[in-house]
Image: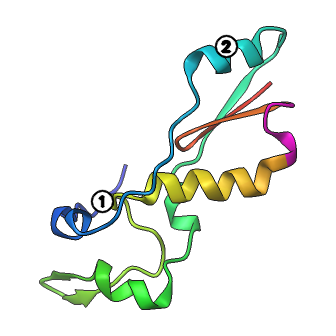
Amino acid sequence: GGRRLCIDYRRLNKVTVRERTAPPRIEEVMDTLSTARIFTTLDLRSGYWQLPTAPESQKKTAFITCFGQYQWKVMPFGLKNAPAAFIRYLTDVLFDLINECVVLYVDDILIY
């Protein structure tokens, strides 16, 4: 692996209203998969980076390095609502396939 930025967003997360989403219950997933015979998984590495950050929110993600100040144009890791936003996006994109041949969990896709 390469280098990764590690940014402390605790102060921003403290004032962010949590978006309430819950991952699927394991019992529901197992029930959905009970008749499936073939499976594959996709781990969407750096998946959050596929979601643009709203221009008015970019300044809230700013950070400083020895090379200057930067702000994210895509969803960074560490934001309180990043997982919820990502799963909402995947749900919108894969809506017709969910529970037909796809199960979503955080940044993973199970195809059956």
Q: What element carries label 1?
A: loop
Tell me, for residue 85, which label it has, or none.
none
Label 1 and label 2: CA atoms lie apart by 35 Å
32 left or right of 104 in image: right
The image shows residue 76, relative to residue 33, as above or below, that is below
- Provide residue 88's location: percent of width, then percent of height: 62, 55
The residue at the far left in this view is 66
Q: Dot 2: within a 10 Å radius of its alpha carbon, few (fewer than 14), some, or many (20 or more) residues?
A: few
Q: Where is residue 59 in the image (x, y as percent from the top left)?
A: 32, 88
Task: Residue 98: say if magenta.
Answer: yes
Q: Where is residue 106 in the image (x, y as percent from the top left)?
A: 52, 41
Query: Which quadrant of the view contains residue 78?
Result: bottom left
Q: Which of 69 and 28 is in front in this view?
A: 28
Q: In which quarter of the image is residue 66?
A: bottom left
Label 1: how many residues lie within 10 Å, few (<14), some (14-19) or many (20+)?
few
**Image position of 43 with respect to 28: above or below:** below
Q: How is the image coloured?
A: rainbow
| Quadrant showing the C terminus | top right
> Which image quarter: residue 77?
bottom left
Q: In this view, does 40 lie to the left or right of 46?
A: right
Amino acid bearing label 2: Met
Q: Name the residue rendered at 27%, 83% in the picture.
A: 62
Q: Which labelled disc corresponds to residue 30?
A: 2
Name the foreground residue: 60 vs 14.
14
Instruction: From the viewer's side, name the closer residue of 75 and 41.
Output: 75
Residue name at image x 66 percent, y 19 percent: 28
Q: Mark 1 points at which residue?
A: 4
The residue segment tinted magenta is 96-100
